[in-house]
């Protein structure tokens, strides 16, 4: 399984509009972060988790010419706003794009992209909606386990793919749901900043979860400019914990 970080930033991305801090003005490409998204590829499937406002550019940057499915963690705009751009894949692949999300999120997609479900116009995105309601489900033979997380007061989903577990935008996970992470060899978890935050894990909370799960490798994502320069972040992390950056890939 090949895993690629399409975006590792917050809802504002980095650099933040109008910000002149050291991170937002950094020349280090690892300090340039698009909105958070992940691509997972096996021999049978290529899927992307979340299609935020940067989805089009992420697909172009990675030279992606085919896509089998989109999974959604939740309905916030920085996770769904780029959905219209699946039209290119509709045209290339001559079929609708399969979307997987829990029913509440699918309803939000229907509401926000109402025109996509109007068959009277030929140029709209073509979408197949699949509700995530089971303890696990398969896409082209890839088994996916949904993980219930809390994003402040909003229930959202993380996902486990075999030895890989993916968590973003969370600030709480119950003991019962933590059991689904047990044995993960690779863990991706959001770490917004060093200071505590009401809706996301901060660095200490992310590191505590990593210490509990004890994966071989852990990757931090959904990182804000408040975390500091990439080169400085490296100095205070264990060797097994990697601050992810856009375009980083690894094999599971």
Image: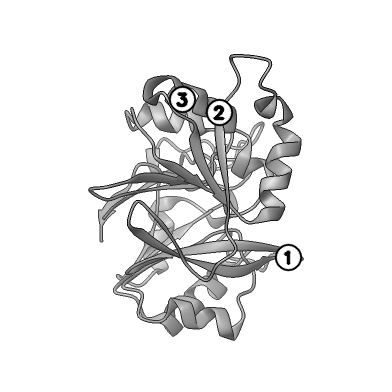
153 relative to 150 in the view: left or right: right
On the image, the x and y values in percent for residue 117 come to 67, 29
Residue furthest front as drawn:
119
218 relative to 172 in the view: left or right: left
- Which marked residue is nearer to the observer: mark 3 or mark 1? 3
Viewer-closest of 170 and 230: 170
At mark 3, the secondary structure is: helix
Q: Are marks 3 and 1 in contact (CB under 8 Å)?
A: no
Residue under label 3: 90
Residue under label 1: 152
The quarter holding residue 186 reads bottom left
Residue at x 29% of width, y 74% of height: 216
Residue at x 66% of width, y 47% of height: 106
Residue under label 2: 126
State the CA–CA distance, disc 3 to disc 2.
Answer: 7 Å
Q: Quadrant of the C terminus?
A: bottom left
Query: As displayed, is residue 121 above or below residue 38?
Result: above
């Amino acid at each position: 399984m090949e895993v690629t970080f399409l975006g590792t930033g917050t809802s504002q991305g980095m650099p933040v509009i109008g910000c002149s801090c050291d991170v937002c003005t950094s020349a280090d490409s690892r300090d340039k972060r698009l909105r958070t998204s992940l691509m997972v590829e096996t021999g049978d499937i290529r899927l992307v988790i979340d299609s935020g406002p940067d989805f089009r550019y992420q697909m172009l940057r990675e030279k992606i010419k085919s896509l089998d499915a989109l999974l959604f963690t939740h309905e916030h705009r920085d996770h769904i706003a780029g959905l219209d751009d699946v039209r290119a894949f509709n045209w290339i692949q001559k079929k609708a794009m399969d979307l997987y999300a829990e029913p509440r999120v699918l309803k939000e997609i229907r509401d926000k992209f109402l025109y996509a479900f109007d068959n009277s116009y030929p140029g709209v995105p073509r979408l197949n909606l699949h509700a995530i309601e089971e303890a696990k489900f398969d896409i082209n033979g890839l088994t996916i386990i949904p993980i219930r997380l809390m994003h402040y007061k909003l229930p959202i989903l993380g996902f486990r793919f075999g030895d890989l577990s993916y968590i973003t935008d969370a600030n709480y996970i119950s003991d019962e749901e933590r059991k689904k992470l047990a044995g993960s060899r690779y863990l991706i978890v959001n770490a917004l900043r060093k200071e505590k935050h009401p809706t996301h894990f901060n660095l200490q909370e992310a590191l505590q979860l990593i210490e509990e799960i004890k994966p071989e490798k852990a990757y931090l994502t959904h990182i804000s400019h408040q975390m500091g320069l990439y080169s400085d972040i490296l100095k205070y992390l264990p060797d097994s914990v990697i601050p992810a950056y856009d375009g980083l890939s690894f094999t599971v």
